[in-house]
Image (cartoon, coloured by chain):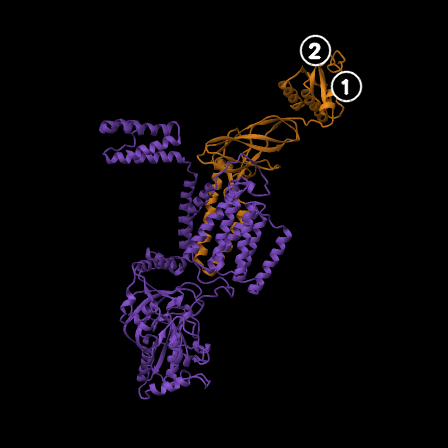
C-alpha cells in the first residue's frame, strides 16, 4: 500500500506524465495538473495590493471586491480544471509522414461531458500549439504539429493538452504519450532527377530509353522528363510545358537501384531513392526498387508507392 | 454599411467592444471627481477605440500615442500640481489605462487592462461607496470578465495570435456573458463569508496620503452669510440617529456643532486654540435622559454632533470648553457613537472667566450705527431677558422673511440686513441677533450644527441631512449660564418662503394649514424616499460600517461573546472548505441540462397526479405507474398514456426540441 502511495506521489509524473499508455486515455483527476499562469500571478499580486488598500482605508466595498475577485479565482480553478477533466484522448490516427517536415498528427478526442469544452490547446514541446473547441458529447480530432527528425517506425512523441479557459488565470494541462508508432519516410532529397537508364538487375539488361514506343498522350511536364519528349507545339500555344507520353510494354520498367545513387551515406542514398520513387510515381511509370537486401518488382499505383516508401523508411532498422 | 451590419459582420470582434463598455462603466463614477477635460479625453479615447473596432477609423501610431501620453501627464500636472496622491494618482491611472487601449496585441495586454480596470474600481470606492455605484461596478465586473472570456476564447480578436485555431465553435456572446455571470454568482457565497468572517483591523496600516479624504460637504469652522444656505438644497445625509429612549420633541432637536464668537464684520470664527480647551461635565440635566446612537458620515473634521447637551463621553472623544463633542482623530469613515444627552439642562454660571470676548464688536466704527440706535430702544438694562424678548419680537413683527436666496450684503452686513433687505437664512438671523445682544451688553455667541431630523417610519432611524444645517445663538445670563436662543424660530410661518423650511423650523409650532395639503403623489414620493433612505441606512450600518465592533456584536448575537482572531480564522476556513466541496460538486457534476428539464417537467406531472390522489412510489417505473393511473382515472387515460410515452421517448430514445415542447404543453394542460 505504501508503495502504491509512493507511486502516486512520484514527482516525475508531473513532468513526463504516466509514460506510454494504451489509447484511449481518459484524463482523470490524477492526470490533469493545474497551476496559475503569469497573468494569474499578476492577478494575485493585484488582489494583495487591493486587500492592503482596503485594510488601510477601512473600505468595506474594497474588501468585498477583493474577496469577490479572490473567490472568482478559486471558482476559475474548478472551471479550468473541468475543461480537461474526463476528456478521453486517443488513439492517434497516424498517417505516414516524411522526415524533417512540418507535419501534423491527428489525435482523436472524445468529449464525454454534457458541456462543450473551449480553447483546448494541443502541442508537442518544440512546436506551436493548435487550439480547438470540442462540442458536448462529441467525437472530434486534435491536430498536433510535429516534425519527425528521423525516418523509421518512430514512437509517437509525448504531447501536451492544455487549457486556460475561461479567464487565462490558470493553466490546466495533461501529458499524454501513446503506445503507438508513426511511420516516417526518409526525407526526399531536393536536387535529383530520375535515372534515365537503369543498370539492370541480375541479367544486366540495359533498359531502353524510356517509353519510346507508341505515343499515348500528353501530360504536364514533371521534373526529370527528357527534353526530347517535350511537346513544343503546345508550349508555343499555351506557354505550359507538356510532355509526350509513350506507352511501351516491356522497356518502360524503371529500376531504382541503390547502387545507382549518386550520393554517399545510407541516409543520403535513401533520401535520393525516396525522391526517385516519388518522381517515378508522379510520372506514372512502372518502377521497381532495388535495395541491398530487398528487391521490389516493378509496379505502379498507390499501394506500390506506399510499400516502396515503407521499405525505404525501415531500411536497416530492426 | 450600417452599424448593425458591421456588428454582424464576422470581422468585428465583440470581445473588444465588451471590454470598452466595461471600462466605460468603471469610469462613469470617476467623472464626478476628475477634471472635466480628463473626463472628455478618457471617453473620447474609448470611443476612438470603439470606432476602430467598428472599422470606422484608424488607430494612432506610436508617435501620436507617445505625444498623447506626454500631453495627458502635462494636463494632470497642471490640474493637480502633482502626480502623486489619491486624486492625481487615480487621474493618471485612468488616463494611461485608456491610452493602453491602443496597444491590445496579446492576451497579456488584455490582462493588464482588466487588472488596471479592477484597480480603478477599488479607487472608485475610496470616493464613493453608494448603492448605485456598487451596482454599476458589479455590472462593470460582468462586462470585464466577459471580455476576458471572449479574448481567451476567440484568438482572432488578438493580432498576435500564437496558436493556430482549428474548428472553433462559433459562440454567441450571450454564452460568454452567461458564463461570466454564472462564475461570479458561484463566487458570491465565498465573498460573503470572507466579508463577514475575515478578521478586521482597526485603523490604517500606515499613513494615508494628505488628500485621502478631502472635499466633503458639510459644516465648517467658519461661518459667513451664505455659508449654510449653500447647504440648503443638499439632501446628503449628515448622520443618522437611532433613539434608544423616547424621541425628544422636535423643538429640542438641536445637534451641536462648532461654536464661534469672533466676528470681523463678515465671518464668524473660533480661534483654534480656544476650540481645543477642554471642559468637564458641569451642568445639571433636567428631566429624562435621552439615549441614542449616532452613525456619522465621514466629514474629515473632529466634530461629533450630539444633542444639546451630551452627558457622556464615548471612547476616543473629548468635550471642548463650549460643550462641543470632539473626536480625537478626524472622522474619515462611517463612525458609530453611543451617546446620551439632556435636552433640558442648566449650565453652571462662572465668575472667573471674563466675558470680554463674548461682548466684542467689530472694530470698525462706521458700521452698526443703526443697530446701536435700535438697541437703545430695545435694551432693558435691568432684565436681560426682556431685552432678548424685545429683539425676538422685533424679528417677528418687523416683516422679516426667511429666504434661501437672500440679497447680497456689502459693507455693513448687519445693518443692511436688519434695516434694508430683511431677508435672510438662519445664519443672518443668528449673527445679527448675537451682535444686537452684544450691543446691549449681553454676552452672546453663535452655535452651528443641525436642527431637526426626519424619522423614517420604516426603520425608525432619524436622518439628519446637510439641508438641516442650522445656526443659532447662545446668550449668557448671570443666573442661568449659557442659554440657547434661536432667533430664526421667531420668524412668522407666513414669512417663510419655502414650505420645507417652514415645516422644519416650526415643527413644534402650530402649523399653518395650507402647508399640509400634500397631494397623493407627493405622499407617494415621500414614502419612496423613506424606503430608499431605509435601504441606504441598512447599507451604511451593515456593509459600509461593518468593522470589528460590528463583527464582535454579530458573534455576540449568535452566542459567541468573545471571538478571537484564531477562532475567526478557524471558522472562516471550515466554512470555506465546505463551500469549496459544494462548488466542486456543482462544477464537476456532469448533469445533462436536457435530462434535467425532462425530469423536472415529469415531476410537475407527478405533482398533478398527487393532487388527484395518486403518487408514484420510488420503485415504480413510469410504465407501471401509467397502468395504475389509467385504472384509477379512466377518463384521462389518453392524456396519461401520451405523456408517459413522450417521457420515455425523450428520455431513453431521442431528444428533440419539438417533442419536448409537446411534452411540456401536455403536462401544462393536464
- Residue B353 visible to the viewer: no
- Foreground residue, A170 or B358? B358
Mark nearest the camera among 2 and 1 is: 1
- Residue, disc 2: A249
Q: Where is residue A30 in the image (x, y as percent from the top left)?
A: 49, 37
Along the horizontal axis of the image, is B47 left or right of B274?
A: right
Chain A tint in image: orange
Image quarter (top left, top right, bottom left or bottom right) of the C terminus of chain A = top right
Measured in 3D between alpha carbons, the distance from the residue under mark 2 to the one under mark 1, in whole angstroms, is 20 Å
- Residue, disc 1: A228
Give the answer, above or below, for where B38 lies relative to B474.
above
The residue positioned 75% from the left and 25% from the top of the image is A263
Q: Is mark 1 on a helix, strand or loop?
A: helix
User: Badge 1: how crowded within 10 Å, few (<14), some, or many (20+)?
Assistant: few
- Residue A213 visible to the viewer: yes
Q: Which of marks 2 and 1 is nearer the N terminus?
A: 1
Q: Quadrant of residue B279 in the image?
A: bottom left
Give the answer, above or below, for where B171 lies relative to A248.
below
Image mark 2: chain: A
Q: Is mark 2 on a helix, strand or loop?
A: loop
User: Badge 2: how crowded within 10 Å, few (<14), some, or many (20+)?
Assistant: few
Q: Quadrant of residue A276 in the image?
A: top right
Report the chain shown in purple. B
Image mark 1: chain: A
Dot label at residue B342 = none
Amino acid at each position: 500500500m505504501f508503495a502504491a502511495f509512493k507511486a502516486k506521489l512520484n514527482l516525475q509524473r508531473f513532468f513526463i506524465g504516466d509514460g506510454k499508455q494504451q489509447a484511449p486515455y481518459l484524463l482523470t483527476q490524477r492526470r490533469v495538473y493545474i497551476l496559475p499562469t503569469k497573468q494569474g500571478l499578476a492577478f494575485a499580486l493585484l488582489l494583495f495590493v487591493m486587500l492592503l488598500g482596503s485594510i488601510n482605508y477601512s473600505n468595506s466595498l474594497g474588501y468585498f471586491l477583493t474577496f469577490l475577485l479572490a473567490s472568482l479565482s478559486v471558482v476559475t480553478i474548478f472551471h479550468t480544471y473541468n475543461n480537461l477533466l474526463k476528456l478521453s484522448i486517443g488513439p492517434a490516427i497516424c498517417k505516414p509522414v516524411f522526415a524533417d517536415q512540418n507535419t501534423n498528427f491527428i489525435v482523436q478526442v472524445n468529449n464525454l461531458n454534457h458541456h462543450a469544452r473551449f480553447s483546448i490547446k494541443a502541442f508537442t514541446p518544440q512546436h506551436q500549439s493548435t487550439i480547438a473547441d470540442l462540442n458536448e458529447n462529441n467525437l472530434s480530432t486534435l491536430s498536433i504539429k510535429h516534425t519527425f527528425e528521423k525516418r523509421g517506425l518512430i514512437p509517437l512523441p509525448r504531447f501536451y493538452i492544455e487549457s486556460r479557459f475561461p479567464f487565462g488565470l490558470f493553466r490546466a494541462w495533461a501529458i499524454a504519450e501513446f503506445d503507438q508508432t508513426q511511420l516516417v519516410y526518409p526525407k526526399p532529397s531536393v536536387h535529383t532527377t530520375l535515372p534515365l537508364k537503369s543498370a539492370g538487375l541480375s541479367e544486366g539488361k540495359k533498359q531502353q530509353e524510356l517509353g519510346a514506343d507508341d505515343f499515348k498522350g500528353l501530360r504536364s511536364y514533371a521534373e526529370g522528363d527528357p527534353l526530347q519528349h517535350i511537346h513544343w507545339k503546345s508550349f508555343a500555344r499555351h506557354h505550359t510545358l507538356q510532355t509526350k507520353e509513350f506507352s511501351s510494354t516491356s522497356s518502360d520498367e524503371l529500376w531504382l537501384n541503390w547502387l545507382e545513387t549518386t550520393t554517399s551515406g545510407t541516409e543520403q542514398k535513401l533520401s535520393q531513392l525516396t525522391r526517385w520513387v516519388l518522381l517515378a510515381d508522379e510520372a506514372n511509370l512502372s518502377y521497381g526498387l532495388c535495395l541491398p537486401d530487398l528487391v521490389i518488382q516493378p509496379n505502379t499505383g498507390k499501394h506500390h508507392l506506399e510499400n516502396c516508401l515503407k521499405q525505404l523508411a525501415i531500411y536497416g532498422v530492426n | 454599411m450600417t452599424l448593425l451590419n458591421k456588428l454582424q459582420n464576422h470581422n468585428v470582434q465583440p470581445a473588444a467592444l465588451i471590454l470598452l463598455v466595461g471600462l466605460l462603466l468603471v469610469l462613469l463614477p470617476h467623472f464626478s471627481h476628475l477634471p472635466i477635460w480628463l473626463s472628455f479625453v478618457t471617453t473620447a479615447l474609448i470611443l476612438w477605440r470603439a470606432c476602430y473596432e467598428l472599422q470606422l477609423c484608424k488607430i494612432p501610431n506610436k508617435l501620436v500615442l507617445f505625444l498623447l501620453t506626454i500631453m495627458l501627464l502635462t494636463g494632470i500636472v497642471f490640474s493637480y500640481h502633482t502626480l502623486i496622491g489619491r486624486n492625481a494618482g487615480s487621474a493618471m491611472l485612468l488616463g494611461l489605462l485608456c491610452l493602453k487601449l491602443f496597444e491590445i496585441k496579446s492576451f497579456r495586454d488584455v490582462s493588464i487592462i482588466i487588472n488596471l480596470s479592477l484597480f480603478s474600481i477599488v479607487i472608485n470606492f475610496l470616493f464613493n461607496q453608494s448603492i448605485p455605484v456598487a451596482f454599476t461596478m458589479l455590472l462593470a465586473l460582468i462586462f470585464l470578465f466577459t471580455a476576458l472570456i471572449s479574448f481567451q476564447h476567440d484568438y482572432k480578436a488578438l493580432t498576435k495570435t500564437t496558436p493556430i485555431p482549428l474548428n472553433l465553435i462559433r459562440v454567441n456572446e450571450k454564452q460568454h456573458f452567461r458564463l461570466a455571470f454564472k462564475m461570479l454568482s458561484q463566487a458570491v457565497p465565498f465573498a460573503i463569508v470572507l466579508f463577514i468572517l475575515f478578521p478586521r483591523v482597526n485603523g490604517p496600516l500606515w499613513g494615508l496620503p494628505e488628500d485621502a479624504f478631502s472635499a466633503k460637504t458639510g459644516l465648517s469652522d467658519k461661518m459667513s452669510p451664505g455659508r449654510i444656505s449653500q447647504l440648503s438644497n443638499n439632501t446628503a445625509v449628515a448622520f443618522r440617529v437611532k433613539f434608544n429612549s423616547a424621541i425628544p420633541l422636535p423643538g429640542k432637536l438641536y445637534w451641536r456643532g462648532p461654536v464661534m464668537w469672533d466676528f470681523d464684520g463678515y465671518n464668524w470664527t473660533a480661534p483654534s486654540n480656544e476650540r481645543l480647551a477642554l471642559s468637564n461635565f458641569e451642568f445639571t440635566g433636567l428631566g429624562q435622559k435621552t439615549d441614542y446612537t449616532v452613525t456619522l458620515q465621514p466629514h474629515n473634521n473632529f466634530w461629533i454632533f450630539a444633542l444639546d447637551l451630551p452627558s457622556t463621553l464615548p471612547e476616543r472623544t473629548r468635550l471642548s470648553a463650549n460643550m462641543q463633542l470632539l473626536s480625537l482623530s478626524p472622522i474619515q469613515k462611517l463612525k458609530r457613537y453611543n451617546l446620551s444627552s439632556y435636552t433640558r439642562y442648566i449650565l453652571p454660571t462662572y465668575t472667573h472667566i471674563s466675558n470680554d470676548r463674548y461682548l466684542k464688536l467689530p472694530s470698525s466704527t462706521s458700521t452698526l450705527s443703526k443697530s446701536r440706535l435700535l438697541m437703545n430702544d430695545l435694551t432693558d438694562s435691568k432684565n436681560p431677558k426682556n431685552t432678548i424678548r424685545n429683539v425676538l419680537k422685533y424679528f417677528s413683527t418687523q416683516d422679516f422673511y426667511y429666504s434661501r436666496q437672500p440679497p447680497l450684503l456689502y459693507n455693513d452686513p448687519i445693518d443692511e440686513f436688519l434695516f434694508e433687505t430683511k431677508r435672510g437664512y438662519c445664519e443672518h438671523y443668528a449673527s445679527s441677533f448675537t451682535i444686537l445682544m452684544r450691543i446691549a451688553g449681553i454676552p452672546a455667541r453663535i452655535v452651528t450644527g443641525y436642527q431637526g431630523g426626519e424619522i423614517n417610519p420604516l426603520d425608525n432611524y432619524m436622518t439628519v441631512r446637510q439641508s438641516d444645517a442650522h445656526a443659532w445663538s447662545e446668550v449668557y445670563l448671570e443666573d442661568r449660564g449659557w442659554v440657547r436662543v434661536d432667533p430664526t424660530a421667531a420668524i412668522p410661518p407666513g414669512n417663510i418662503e419655502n414650505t420645507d423650511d417652514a415645516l422644519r423650523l416650526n415643527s413644534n409650532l402650530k402649523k399653518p394649514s395650507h402647508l399640509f395639503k400634500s397631494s397623493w403623489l407627493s405622499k407617494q414620493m415621500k414614502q419612496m424616499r423613506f424606503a430608499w433612505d431605509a435601504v441606504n441606512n441598512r447599507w451604511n450600518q451593515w456593509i459600509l460600517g461593518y468593522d470589528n465592533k460590528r463583527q464582535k456584536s454579530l458573534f455576540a448575537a449568535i452566542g459567541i461573546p468573545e471571538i478571537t482572531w484564531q477562532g475567526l480564522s478557524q471558522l472562516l476556513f471550515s466554512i470555506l472548505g465546505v463551500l469549496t466541496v459544494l462548488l466542486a460538486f456543482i462544477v464537476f457534476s456532469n448533469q445533462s441540462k436536457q435530462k434535467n428539464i425532462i425530469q423536472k417537467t415529469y415531476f410537475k406531472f407527478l405533482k398533478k397526479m398527487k393532487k388527484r390522489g395518486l403518487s408514484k412510489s420510488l420503485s415504480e417505473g413510469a410504465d407501471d405507474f401509467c397502468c395504475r393511473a389509467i385504472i384509477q382515472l379512466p377518463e384521462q387515460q389518453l392524456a396519461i398514456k401520451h405523456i408517459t410515452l413522450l417521457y420515455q421517448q425523450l428520455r431513453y430514445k431521442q431528444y428533440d426540441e419539438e417533442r419536448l415542447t409537446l411534452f411540456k404543453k401536455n403536462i401544462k394542460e393536464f
